[in-house]
Image: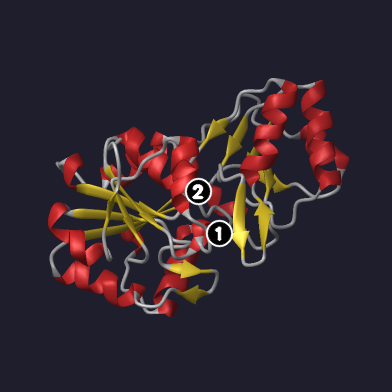
């Protein structure tokens, strides 16, 4: 990491440094269903300059095809090959269960878990589903609750099984509050039951490995990971060996002075910009 960050106006002001931009979604391109002002134009300007732009997202609730539809609706000109999600990284790593059983999946009702390509059943309130599952996949906590977490905890305490985490985020900003994400529930299980977790998405290398399969022969020093969080976007980019850009006006640090958090965590981005 650099000794200190360089402050700049936006990605256009530092574009000469980079050939590839890896953009987080929430807090960089959009806030929920709303696009961030100027983001569509900035992405297009970068593309017009000959830059490669990919979206790296820990959003695992829905397949990347759904994310693409959302971005197109917001006015972005992306292709499916431009979207790299933690769900994609998980799906690429799933192996058949040794007993020909099924995966129990933490997901919302519209998560389309059948697209994972493995036998799976959604985890709801039936204890037998938890007990009979041969492994667990954690995609979305939007419909999760403490009673379902207790069912999962009790069945794992009796018989540990593989746990694949499709979204390692602990929390996510939701306007006036933070939501608990799959990473929160996964880390709780791992800590209390001493279970090993397989985590997919930023800050872990697997999502970057998947992205760079689409970017052969790229100089890592000419790649920028752009995001709104230190502990996923910036830490993941640093660990993988690319440069990093923290966006502060939207997402996690909106309304806060990021300098205190940089000092406390010692996670230092190469650049700090208010918006892309």
Q: Nearer the viewer, residue 245 or 237?
A: 245
Q: In this image, 58 relative to 205: left or right?
A: right
> Residue 213, image x and y in percent?
27, 43
Residue that appears at 66% across and 36% down: 186
Q: Nearer the viewer, residue 164 or 191?
A: 191
Instruction: Give the residue pinned by disc 1.
Output: 62
Q: Is residue 262 visible?
A: yes
Residue that appears at 41% across and 38% down: 267
Whether residues under marks 1 and 2 lie with C-beta atoms below 8 angstroms apart, the answer is yes
Residue 147 drawn above or below residue 240: below
Q: Is residue 91 visible?
A: no
User: In which quadrant of the rendered view does residue 227 lie?
Assistant: bottom left
Residue 106 drawn above or below residue 250: above
Q: In this image, 136 relative to 19: left or right?
A: right
Q: Nearer the viewer, residue 120 or 243?
A: 243
> Residue 185, image x and y in percent?
70, 40
Q: Disc 1 to disc 2, how far (Cα)?
A: 8 Å
Instruction: Give the residue pinned by disc 2.
Output: 87
The secondary element bearing badge 2 is classed as helix
Q: Residues within 10 Å of mark 1 (few under 14, many from 20)?
A: some
């Amino acid at each position: 990491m650099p000794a200190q960050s360089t402050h700049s106006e936006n990605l256009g002001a530092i574009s000469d440094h980079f050939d590839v931009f890896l953009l987080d979604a929430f807090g960089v391109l959009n806030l929920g269903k709303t696009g961030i002002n100027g983001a569509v134009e900035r992405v297009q300007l970068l593309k017009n300059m000959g830059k490669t732009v990919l979206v790296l997202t820990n959003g695992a609730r829905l397949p990347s095809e759904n994310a693409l539809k959302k971005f197109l609706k917001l006015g972005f000109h992306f292709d499916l090959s431009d979207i790299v999600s933690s769900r994609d990284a998980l799906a690429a790593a799933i192996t058949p269960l040794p007993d020909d059983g099924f995966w129990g999946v933490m997901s919302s009702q519209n998560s389309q878990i059948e697209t994972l390509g493995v036998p799976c059943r959604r985890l709801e309130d039936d204890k037998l589903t938890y007990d009979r599952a041969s492994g667990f996949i954690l995609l979305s906590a939007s419909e999760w609750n403490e009673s379902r977490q207790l069912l999962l905890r009790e069945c794992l305490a009796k018989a540990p099984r593989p746990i694949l985490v499709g979204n390692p985020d602990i929390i996510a900003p939701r306007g006036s509050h933070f939501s608990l994400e799959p990473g929160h529930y996964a880390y709780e299980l791992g800590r209390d039951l001493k279970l090993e977790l397989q985590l997919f998405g930023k800050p872990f290398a697997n999502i970057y490995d998947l992205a760079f399969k689409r970017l052969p022969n790229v100089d890592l020093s000419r790649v920028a990971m752009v995001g709104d969080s230190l502990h996923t976007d910036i830490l993941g980019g640093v660990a993988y060996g690319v440069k990093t850009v923290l966006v502060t006006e939207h997402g996690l640090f909106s309304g806060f002075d990021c300098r205190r958090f940089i000092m406390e965590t010692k996670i230092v981005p190469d650049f700090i910009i208010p918006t892309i």
